[in-house]
Image (cartoon, grey):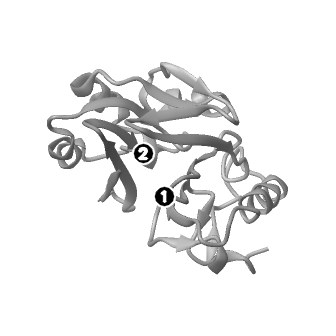
Amino acid sequence: MHFKTIKIGPIQTNCYIISDNNEALVIDPGFDIDQILPFLEGATVNAIVLTHGHFDHVTEAFLLQAKTKAPVLIHEKDENMMAFTNKMKANRLLKNGDVITVGNEKFVVIHTPGHSSGSICLYNEKEKLLFSGDTLFHGTYGRTDLPGSSQKEMEESLKKLLKLPENVKVYPGHGRETTIGDEQGLI
């Protein structure tokens, strides 16, 4: 498995491209799909996964879908927020525990409400990787002062994530990577 991080859009959202065996998964292609497309050449894109419905994570997802024919996936509680931004509906609504595959790799959906009611993380147990969207960052967590956000739900989501092994590498929606171990004192 390989993955690439591309910083995109006006607030430098981390878009991730995960590839394995000529298949790819794109996480949070909010903007700048022309920067993303070259990394997808020769691969079948299995899915475009949106970690939540905020504009910086979803705006150009359907433009990318038009180029790749890949389905767009988002948690069922954030589809309306995503649709408000780009007037489109997802091809698949995610729930906690769903599995998304790319090549031989499996990513489990962890529902982590707080930043938004439908925020999710993607966890690969084999490689000890967590793509955390705007739930968990290096040294902090996602905002909870936005419409649809909740500090109480965020605290519960963080408790859930911090039970993962300490050596899990965390790749957030903004900023640099961290580990679960490095974030143990967060709450």
Query: Could you tell which of marks 1 and 2 lies nearer the N-terminus?
Result: 2
Horizontal side of residue 166 vs 64, given as left or right: right
Q: Quadrant of residue 120?
A: top right
In this picture, residue 57 sits left or right of residue 36: right
Label 2 crowding class (10 Å Cα cut-off): few <14, some 14-19, many 20+? Answer: many
Rendered location of residue 102, percent (x, y): 40, 36
Whether pointer 1 and pointer 2 mark residues with C-beta atoms closer than 8 Å, the reply is yes
Q: Mark 2 is on which residue type?
A: Asp
Q: Residue at x 51, y 40 (%)?
A: 106
Q: How many marks?
A: 2
- Secondary structure type for disc 2: loop
Q: Amino acid at mark 1?
A: Gly
Quadrant of the snapshot with the C terminus: bottom right
Label 1: how many Cα within 10 Å (few below 14, some 14–19, many 20+): many
- Vertical side of 60 occupied by 15: above or below: below
Please name the residue shown 70% across and 36% down the image: 96
Vertical placement of residue 125 versus 74, above or below: below
**Helix, strand or loop at mark 1:** loop
Q: Mark number for residue 28?
A: 2
Quadrant housing residue 77: top right
**In percent of the image, x 48 and y 58: which residue is there?**
173
x, y percent for residue 123: 58, 50
Circle number at residue 182: none
Give the residue displayed 70% in from the left and 48% down from the top. Answer: 112
**Residue that label 1 marks:** 173
Judged left or right of residue 25, residue 37 is left
Give coordinates of residue 85: x percent, y percent: 46, 34
Question: Viewer-proximal residue, 56 or 167?
Answer: 167
Q: CA distance from mark 1 to mark 2?
A: 8 Å
In the rendered image, residue 48, in percent from the top left (x then y), is placed at 40, 34
